[in-house]
Image (spheres, rainbow, N blue to C red):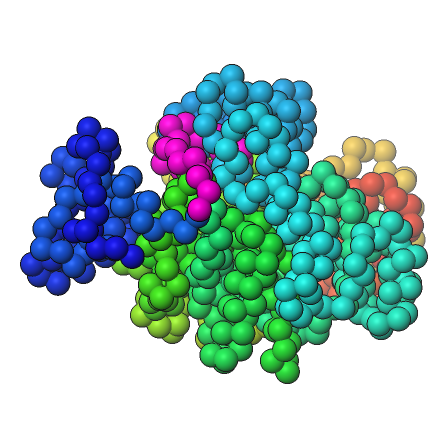
Amino acid sequence: MASCSELAWPEVDLWKNLIIISSNSSSIVDSFETFYYYNKNMLFGKKHLSAVKCCVRNPLLIAPDNFCRQLCTKSKSPIERKEFKKVLVANRVKLLFIRSVGIYSEQDVNQMHRLKADEAYLVGRGMTAVSAYLNIHEIIKLAKMHDVDAIHPGYGFLSERADFAQACNDASITFIGPPPEVMLRMGDKISARVAAAEAGVSVVPGIENPIENAEEAAEFGKQYGFPVIFKAAYGGGGRGMRRVNKLDEVQEAFNRATSEALAAFGNGLMFVEKFIERPRHIEVQILGDMYGNIVHLYERDCSVQRRHQKIIEIAPAPNLDPQKRQLMLDDAVRLARHVKYENAGTVEFLLDQDGRHYFIEVNARLQVEHTVTEDITGVDLVQAQVRIAEGKSLEDLHLRQDLVTPIGSALQCRITAEDPSMDFCPDSGRIEVFRSGEGMGIRIDSASAYAGALVSPYYDSLLVKVIAHSRNYKTTVNKMMRALKEFRIRGVKTNIPFLLNVLNNQRFLDGLVDTCFIDENPDLFKFVPSQNRAQKLLRFLKDVKVNGPMTPLVTGIPSAKVTPIVPEYDTRPLLKGWRDVLLEKGPVNFAKEIRKNKGLLLTDTTFRDAHQSLLATRVRTYDLQRIAPFLAHAMPNLFSLEMWGGATFDVSMRFLHECPWERLEILRKQVPNIPFQMLLRGANAVGYTNYPDNVVVKFCELAKKSGIDVFRIFDSLNYMPNIILGIEAVANAGKD
């Protein structure tokens, strides 16, 4: 490359940006280059500056940026260079810093990306939540209508659709990503396998063409042996993937995988390949420009997966043999060069237990986990995508392979609105509280997680990505644990407890995980219940403020002006009551005496049902004891006193911390002349679920011995078999 001092300078009026670099001090130069490395668009001295390698060693140079760029290009054919003024983001996230145009579905009308974009427009009116973002015709029409220069596809939805990239080109709109022909070859996993084989990269044994039915997959399984795996030909993220362990599972797995791929990617084509047991999932980040230059930005370990969905990503991969690492990096670059790859992409490999690596796919787009690569290399991948699409070379962006060096270790955790205790069932609703963990080395990437945000059931459950970066793997994990513990997300369930269990697992701490890690560690699903005390208190206070107190004891009614006094009663020997008749004549004759009686017989429920309705059965045995002797003297003619059973049993133990059996025995001594009555819930006895028959029978025996005389039996659904069980249990208890 020629020295800048030897160049013929163009006229000043052609200069767009100035480069001002002083090399009087090497530290100044290094500082300037480092500063530019992390901040590629900056104002310095009111001039737009950018560092150019060829100018560094001259004492003081002023050179036009567009002129020096010409020194770095390796292209012999002219390529149009442009600067985008307006970019449409064809996704649900905000990724860019140029004037942005957002699109949103009817279900996303209140989402943050719509509010943060400079312009935002509705797409897919009347369509389903996913179909709206797959509507290529409408997105292109909208982009042309609003003078959009380029479209960034984000990740997911149309990001790997070659027909979308082609539609952009046909409309004279730059697609920020690989060319359509490269996407068609790499986005299709089958043709990508062929390309890898052509480039000398080893692939997993599999069918070279899409399969049309489950029978083809069955034949493959018979030839190569099970397990095998179905994969969507046009998608990723674990959707459209199904492992098949034996022959009779093929048909169902094929149907499920096809249906899932069709819903997620608009194309249900499948291919099948041999399933590699217990591999590590290693992926290599690559960048390519329009001039044939390719660089890798090292690898990421994405082995912590559940159902083929990545949960935690690490860069660089811990405990990876340097020679095996270099082989995968070289293979990724060789494949990218072979297909003339442009823009950002990821080459994914499986590393088996014997150290052999196999190419599995190329993600011809930006990936969710690109953040960890950015942290260890200092390269802004989104900005690099845009600049490459504008026509800049990797050299323009200071992205030579010898300049890309990983620094430290980075770790990303995906916080999702899922309940790990319920098999990761997605949760939806409004986020009531959102506080994130922060601090040095912590990066938060979020577009939909904030207090008041509505988590939709229509899309991926990802709330926020947390990225930790430190000097080594161990301190990075510690930073991540600290940050996750500081998170407070209320209103929806999250997977944070699960993530913390993973980070605390010794195998993970040792960096020795593979794709079976989660399945082989059931302890990851043992969670300490969250107390959430503040939210519970706030919810209670809010309810009381709006609806008033829940019990009459704390209403606005003024306190009694006199202290209640237990009434006096005759202390002479008790008069005989109906219980005396029962004990003297037995149950059969007791029933006859009841029928002969011409008067009105009453049952008093004050000791049970009355305070259940008014006071939630919270009257204590101590208080019942004080009135019981008066009742025995004043009301000996009561047919019965219902004072036990029903909710009494449960409330006594759980809330009053009393023994219900002791209550029965104490009151029986104080009221010996009135029959005690209880509520028996048929087969439920005094609980809230069905019990074995022998439990109900034994319970009735003990209740009768402890003082119960009359059993009132019911069933909440009037289900006769349950009622009959209660009747037979009571009859058995009365035999003696």
User: In the image, is residue 695 above or below residue 69?
Assistant: below
Quadrant where the C terminus lies? Answer: bottom right
Q: Position of residue 61 (x, y in %)?
A: 13, 48
- Whether residue 473 is in magenta: the answer is no
Q: Position of residue 597 (x, y in %)?
A: 85, 38
User: In the image, is residue 717 above or below residue 705?
Assistant: above
Residue farthest along the bottom direction in this orientation: 354
Horizontal side, residue 472 vs residue 270: left or right: left
Q: Residue at x 27, y 45 (%)?
A: 68
Viewer-proximal residue among 503 and 643: 503
Q: Position of residue 542 (x, y in %)?
A: 42, 33
Q: Residue at x 19, y 51 (%)?
A: 6
Q: Is residue 460 visible?
A: yes
Residue farthest along the top direction in this orientation: 145
Viewer-proximal residue among 671 and 425: 425
Horizontal side, residue 13 vs residue 475: left or right: left
Residue farthest along the left direction in this orientation: 24
Q: Is residue 559 visible?
A: no
Viewer-proximal residue among 259 and 645: 259
- Where, by quadrant of the figure, is residue 705 drawn? bottom right
Viewer-proximal residue among 233 and 697: 233
Q: Position of residue 2 (x, y in %)?
A: 25, 55
Q: Residue at x 53, y 27 (%)?
A: 172
- The span picked out in magenta is 76-98
Q: Main secondary structure of the magenta part?
A: loop
Quadrant where the N terminus lies? Answer: bottom left
Q: Residue at x 31, y 45 (%)?
A: 69
